[in-house]
Amino acid sequence: MARYLEARRKGDGLEAAIREAHEDTWLATLTACVAASAAYASLTITEFRGFRDFGLIGAVGMLLCWLATYWTMPAILVVSERIRRSSLRPIALVAALAGHAFETRGEERSAGHSLGSCSGRRGPSSSRVSVSRSSGPWPSSATRGLTRWSTT
């Protein structure tokens, strides 16, 4: 991310800055990732099961985090650039996206097995989640699409 911001400050376009950041950093960050994974993996040779499991989880997790970062960072940078250029304030944009993602048009949804297991009961629950639009304490433009959740 720092290399991307450096390229943007230099005047490079979005695509050129992302390409430069990837080309300049992938090998160094992969090397650091592999070194950290090896350090975690060294715990797998111990006899203590907790350390063995932690070493495996840490080693695989480190590699997966590096892979996920290099796979998703270009998209994240493009979206952040669009938000920065947008006339909407970030909180209004997040509120609008959240409202769109959780919109249910006033229907009641069954919480099903997950609510029942959280409350300590086994099997499907008879609990319902009702959703209603609410303006809350914020101005209406910032909360367009926000919802209020309640369980009954």
Image: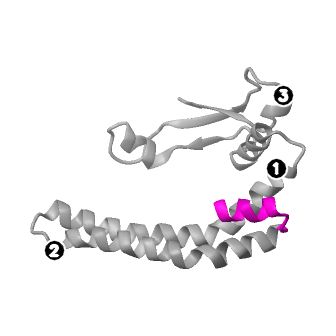
Q: Tags 1 and 3 in contact by the CB under 8 Å rule?
A: no
Mark 1 and mark 3: Cα distance apart in space: 21 Å
Quarter assignment of residue 87: top right
Residue lying at 49% horizontally and 76% vertically, measured from the top left: 30
User: Callout 3: helix, strand or loop?
Assistant: helix
Quadrant in which the N terminus is drawn: bottom right
The residue identified by callout 2 is: 45
Prevailing secondary structure class for the magenta stretch in the rendered image: helix
Residue lying at 54% horizontally and 69% vertically, measured from the top left: 68
Provide the residue span drawn in magenta. Answer: 2-13
The residue identified by callout 3 is: 140
Using the image as rendered, state which of residue 102 and residue 129 is in the foreground: 102
Q: Is residue 83 above or below residue 6?
A: above
**Outermost right residue:** 87
Precedes in sequence: disc 1 or disc 3: 1
Q: Three-letter amino acid code at disc 2?
A: Ile
Q: Three-letter amino acid code at disc 3?
A: Ser
Other-residue count near label 2 (Cα within 10 Å), few / some / many at <14 / 14–19 / ≥20: few
User: Callout 1: helix, strand or loop?
Assistant: helix
Query: Would residue 5 be counted in the magenta stretch?
Result: yes
The percent coordinates of residue 4 (x first, y second) are 71, 64
Using the image as rendered, state which of residue 125 and residue 88 is in the foreground: 88
Using the image as rendered, state which of residue 16 and residue 53 is in the foreground: 16
| Residue 98: mark | none
Quarter assignment of residue 103: top right
User: Callout 2: helix, strand or loop?
Assistant: helix
Q: Three-letter amino acid code at disc 1?
A: Arg
